[in-house]
Image (spheres, rainbow, N blue to C red):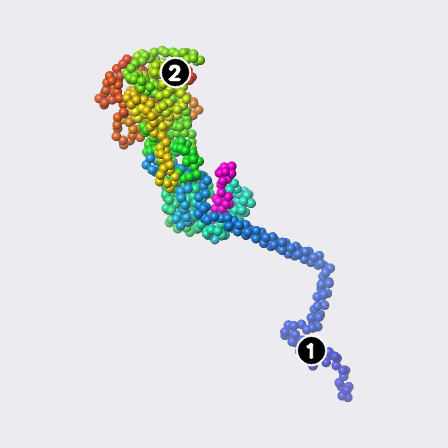
C-alpha cells in the first residue's frame, strides 16, 4: 500500500532541488531581476530568430550604415593625423621665426628715409619734410589716452588673444560678404599684433640696393593674399611668444604711418599738435588713432573737419569700452582737437620747398638721417606777403581770372625772409613761380644799364636825346625801338629816362657804355640766365626768375656788392650740437662802386616818388624800385626796396596769355605796396642809402628834388594821363621786334 501510495518515482530534475525550490527560484529571480537559465536560453533563441528574420528586410540599410561609419572613422583618422602634422609644422615655423626676432628696441625705427625739420629765423618749427620720427615712445611714457584709443579702435581683445583672433576674422569676413566684397577685401580682422607684423613686413627690411623702390616695397608688404595672411598670422604668434603685449604695442605706436610724413605717434603729435605724445588730451588721442585706418585721407592738414568727425567716432568707442566716462567723452566731442599754429598755417610751404631743392641732396631730398635746418624765414613777413597777395586778388582782380603772381622778400644781404610762389599760398610741393618760372624782365632790367653807366663815371644828371632811333642788326635788319607813349621827349637826364622808363635813352646808354659790359654787370649781380646778345638787352629781352631779379636789386641796396639769395643758415643732425654747414649764400664780391650804387638808388627813388612806380609809394618810408612789362604785357614786374627790405613781385599767366590792363606800375606795384606796408608795420622809418648828384636840388624833407632839365616833367604828365585812361599804372610794352621787350 505504501508503495502504491508513493506513485511514480521522481524525475532526475526533481531530485536536483528540494521541494518548493523551483518556485522559490522563480520568486528569487523575480525579486533580483535575474533571469533563470531557461529564460536566458529562450531569450537567446528569440534573438537569433529575430536577427535571422530581419536580415532579409534591413540588411542593405545596415550595410550602408556600416559603410558610412567606416568612412567617417577613416576621414577622422586621416584628419587628425594631417592636423597634427600641420600643427607641428606651424609650431616649428613659429619657433623658427621666434629665433629670428631681434630685441624689441631694434624694431622701433624702421624708416628707410630720414626727416628734415625746418626752423624759422627765431628757432621755431615751421615745416617738416621726409619721414618724421620724433623719437621713441613706450607704453609707459605715452599718454594712456593714446593706448586706450588704439586698443578701442583697432583691437579691443588685444590683451586677451594669442596674436590671432578667429572671432575677429570671422566677423570681418561676414561684414565683407554682406557689403558685396570678397571675404578678404575690405575689413581684414587683423589684430594689433598682425598689423605690427605687417608694419615689420614680416621681418623683411627694405634694402635700397635691391633695385625696387621704397613705395613698391611697402605695397608688397601691404598685400592681402591668403598666403600672405597665413604668414602674417604665424609671424604674429611668434611675436606673442617673443614679446610682451606692451612691447608689441610699443612697436606699433612707433612704426605706424599717420600722414603728413609722420612715422609713429610721437612724430604725429608733434606734427599736428606741437606737443609730445605723452601730453595729448583724449580728443587729440582720438584724432591720432583715427588716422590709422586711412592716414592721408584723415590727416587734419588735409581736412580738419573730416579728421574731427573721425575722432568723434573713436571717442564713442572709447566710451563704450569704458576708457572714458560720459563727462570725459562729452568734453572730447564738444572740444575737438585743433592743429598747432605751424600745422594750421603751413607757413612757408613754397619757402620750405625752395630750401629742400637748394640744399645738399644727401641731407635734404634723399637724407637717411634726421636733419635740423635753421632758415632765414620770418613768419611775420611771410604772413604779410600772403595777406597782401590775397587782398589784391580779392579786391582788385576780376573774378575767374587765372592770372598768377609771386612775391619774394629778402634782406640786403640776400637772406630770403618770405616767399610766395603763387596765388594758392597754403600749399607744398606746388609749382613755385618765384624760383621756377623764367620770364622776360622788361624794363625791370634797366637799372643794370644805368648801374654800368654810374660805375663808369656818368652822372644821373647827364643827358641823352630821346628821339626816333634805328639800328642795323646783322642778320635781322633794321630795328627801331619806341617808347610806350609813342612820343619823344628830346633831351632828358639819365634820371628822367629811368624815372619815366624811356626805351630809346636806355638803348643809347647801353650802346654807349658797351652792351657786353652791361651783360657782365647784370651777371655779376646774380642774373644767371642767358642774356640777350643784341641791343634789346637794355630793354629786358632776357629771361630771369623773380628770386634772381630780387637778389640783383638787393646788390644795389647793399652798396653794389653781389648777393646770393639764401634760405639756409645752419644744418645739423638731430642730437648734434655742432652744425655740419652754415649759410649757403650772402654778400659776395663788389660789382660797382658804393657811390655809383648810391646815385643809382637816388635815381630809382624817383621812379616811386615821381615816376612810373608811384602806386608802390609807402607812407613815411623812402622807397626805390622799377617797373617792368614785357612784350604784349605777358609779364608785369615791380621790384624795389626800402632801407630795410627788398621785395620783388611778378604777375602773369602760366601759359603766357597777355595780361589785360595790367602793367608793372599797376597791380604788381600795388601788391608790392600792400606787402611792404605790412612788412614795415611797427618799424621806425629810416632813409635810403642814396646820394644825390651834385647840382640836384633837395626838397624840405631832405630828399632830392626834381631834376632841372628839359622834357622830363612833360613826359611824366603824358604818362600819367595814359595810365589813368588805360588803368594799367602807366607801364606797358612798346612796339618792338619779337625778341625785344621794352616798357616802362
Q: Residue 585 appears at what percent x and percent y?
A: 36, 30
**Which residues lie in the magenta part?**
192-218
Q: Nearer the viewer, residue 468 or 510?
A: 510
Is 456 placed above or below 89 here? Answer: above
Q: Residue beneath label 2, please?
A: 535
Could you tell me how far apart the alpha carbons at marks 2 and 1 are, in whole angstroms? 151 Å
Q: Residue furthest bottom?
A: 1
Image check: 14 left or right of 430?
Answer: right
Q: Quadrant of residue 727?
A: top left
Q: Residue at x 36, y 34 (%)?
A: 582
Q: Which mark is residue 22?
A: 1
- Give the class, few, some or many, for how many residues have Cα within 10 Å of label 2's Cα (few <14, many ≥20): many
Callouts 2 and 1 close, C-beta under 8 Å? no
Q: Residue at x 36, y 28 (%)?
A: 564
Image check: 67 left or right of 518?
Answer: right
Q: Residue at x 47, y 48 (%)?
A: 102
Can you say which quadrant of the picture contains the C terminus? top left
Asked whether residue 452 is in view, the answer is yes
Q: Residue 591 appears at what percent x and percent y?
A: 33, 23
Amino acid at each position: 500500500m505504501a508503495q502504491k501510495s508513493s506513485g511514480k518515482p521522481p524525475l532526475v530534475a526533481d531530485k536536483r532541488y528540494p521541494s518548493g525550490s523551483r518556485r522559490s527560484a522563480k520568486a528569487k529571480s523575480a525579486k533580483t531581476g535575474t533571469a533563470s537559465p531557461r529564460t536566458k536560453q529562450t531569450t537567446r533563441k528569440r534573438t537569433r530568430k529575430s536577427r535571422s528574420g530581419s536580415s532579409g528586410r534591413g540588411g542593405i540599410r545596415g550595410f550602408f550604415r556600416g559603410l558610412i561609419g567606416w568612412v567617417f572613422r577613416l576621414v577622422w583618422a586621416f584628419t587628425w593625423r594631417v592636423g597634427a602634422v600641420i600643427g607641428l609644422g606651424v609650431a616649428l615655423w613659429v619657433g623658427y621665426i621666434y629665433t629670428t626676432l631681434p630685441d624689441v628696441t631694434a624694431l622701433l625705427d624702421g624708416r628707410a628715409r630720414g626727416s628734415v625739420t625746418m626752423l624759422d629765423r627765431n628757432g621755431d618749427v615751421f615745416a617738416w619734410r621726409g619721414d618724421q620720427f620724433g623719437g621713441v615712445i613706450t607704453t609707459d611714457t605715452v599718454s594712456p589716452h593714446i593706448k586706450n584709443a588704439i586698443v578701442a579702435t583697432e583691437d579691443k581683445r588685444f590683451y586677451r588673444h594669442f596674436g590671432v583672433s578667429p572671432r575677429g576674422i570671422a566677423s570681418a569676413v561676414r561684414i565683407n560678404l554682406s557689403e558685396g566684397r570678397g571675404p578678404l577685401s575690405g575689413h581684414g580682422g587683423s589684430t594689433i599684433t598682425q598689423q605690427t607684423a605687417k608694419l615689420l613686413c614680416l621681418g623683411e627690411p627694405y634694402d635700397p640696393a635691391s633695385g625696387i623702390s621704397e613705395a613698391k616695397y611697402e605695397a608688397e608688404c601691404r598685400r592681402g593674399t591668403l598666403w600672405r595672411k597665413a604668414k602674417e598670422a604665424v609671424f604674429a604668434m611668434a611675436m606673442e611668444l617673443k614679446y610682451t603685449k606692451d612691447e608689441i604695442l610699443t612697436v606699433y605706436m612707433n612704426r605706424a604711418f599717420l600722414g603728413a610724413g609722420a612715422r609713429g605717434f610721437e612724430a604725429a603729435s608733434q606734427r599736428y599738435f606741437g606737443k609730445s605724445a605723452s601730453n595729448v588730451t583724449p580728443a587729440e588721442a582720438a584724432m591720432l588713432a583715427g588716422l590709422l585706418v586711412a592716414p592721408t585721407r584723415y590727416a587734419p592738414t588735409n581736412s580738419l573737419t573730416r579728421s574731427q568727425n573721425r575722432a568723434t567716432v573713436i571717442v564713442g568707442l572709447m566710451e563704450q569700452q569704458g576708457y572714458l566716462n560720459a563727462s570725459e567723452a562729452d568734453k572730447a566731442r564738444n572740444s575737438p582737437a585743433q592743429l598747432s599754429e605751424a600745422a594750421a598755417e603751413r607757413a612757408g610751404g613754397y619757402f620750405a620747398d625752395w630750401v629742400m631743392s637748394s640744399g645738399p641732396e644727401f641731407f635734404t631730398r634723399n637724407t637717411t638721417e634726421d636733419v635740423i635746418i635753421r632758415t632765414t624765414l620770418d613768419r611775420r613777413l611771410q604772413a604779410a606777403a600772403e595777406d597782401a597777395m590775397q587782398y589784391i586778388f580779392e579786391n582788385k582782380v576780376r573774378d575767374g581770372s587765372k592770372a598768377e603772381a609771386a612775391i619774394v622778400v629778402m634782406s640786403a644781404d640776400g637772406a630770403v625772409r618770405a616767399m610766395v610762389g603763387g596765388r594758392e599760398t597754403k600749399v607744398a610741393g606746388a609749382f613755385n613761380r618765384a624760383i621756377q618760372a623764367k620770364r622776360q624782365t622788361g624794363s625791370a632790367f634797366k637799372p643794370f644799364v644805368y648801374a654800368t653807366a654810374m660805375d663808369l663815371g656818368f652822372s644821373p644828371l647827364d643827358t641823352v636825346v630821346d628821339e626816333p632811333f634805328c639800328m642795323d642788326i646783322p642778320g635781322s635788319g633794321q630795328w627801331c625801338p619806341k617808347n610806350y607813349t609813342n612820343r619823344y621827349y628830346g633831351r632828358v637826364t639819365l634820371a628822367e629816362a629811368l624815372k619815366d622808363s624811356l626805351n630809346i635813352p636806355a638803348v643809347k646808354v647801353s650802346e654807349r657804355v658797351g652792351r657786353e659790359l652791361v651783360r657782365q654787370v647784370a651777371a655779376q649781380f646774380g642774373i644767371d640766365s642767358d642774356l640777350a646778345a643784341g641791343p634789346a638787352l637794355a630793354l629786358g629781352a632776357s629771361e630771369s626768375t623773380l628770386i634772381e631779379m630780387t637778389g640783383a636789386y638787393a646788390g644795389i641796396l647793399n652798396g653794389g656788392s653781389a648777393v646770393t639769395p639764401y634760405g639756409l643758415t645752419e644744418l645739423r643732425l638731430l642730437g648734434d650740437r655742432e652744425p655740419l654747414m652754415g649759410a649757403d649764400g650772402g654778400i659776395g664780391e663788389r660789382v660797382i662802386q658804393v657811390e655809383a650804387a648810391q646815385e643809382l638808388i637816388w635815381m630809382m627813388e624817383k621812379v616811386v616818388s615821381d615816376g612810373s612806380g608811384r602806386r608802390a609809394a609807402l607812407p613815411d618810408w623812402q622807397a626805390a624800385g622799377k617797373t617792368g612789362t614785357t612784350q604784349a604785357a605777358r609779364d608785369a614786374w615791380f621790384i624795389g626796396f626800402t632801407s630795410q627790405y627788398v621785395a620783388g613781385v611778378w604777375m602773369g599767366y602760366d601759359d603766357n596769355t597777355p595780361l589785360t590792363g595790367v602793367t608793372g606800375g599797376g597791380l604788381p606795384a600795388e601788391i608790392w605796396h600792400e606787402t611792404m606796408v605790412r612788412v614795415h608795420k611797427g618799424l621806425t622809418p629810416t632813409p635810403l642809402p642814396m646820394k644825390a648828384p651834385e647840382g640836384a636840388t633837395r626838397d624840405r624833407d631832405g630828399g632830392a628834388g626834381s631834376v632841372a632839365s628839359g622834357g622830363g616833367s612833360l613826359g611824366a604828365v603824358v604818362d600819367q594821363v595814359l595810365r589813368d585812361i588805360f588803368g594799367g599804372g602807366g607801364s606797358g610794352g612798346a612796339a618792338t621786334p619779337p625778341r625785344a621787350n621794352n616798357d616802362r
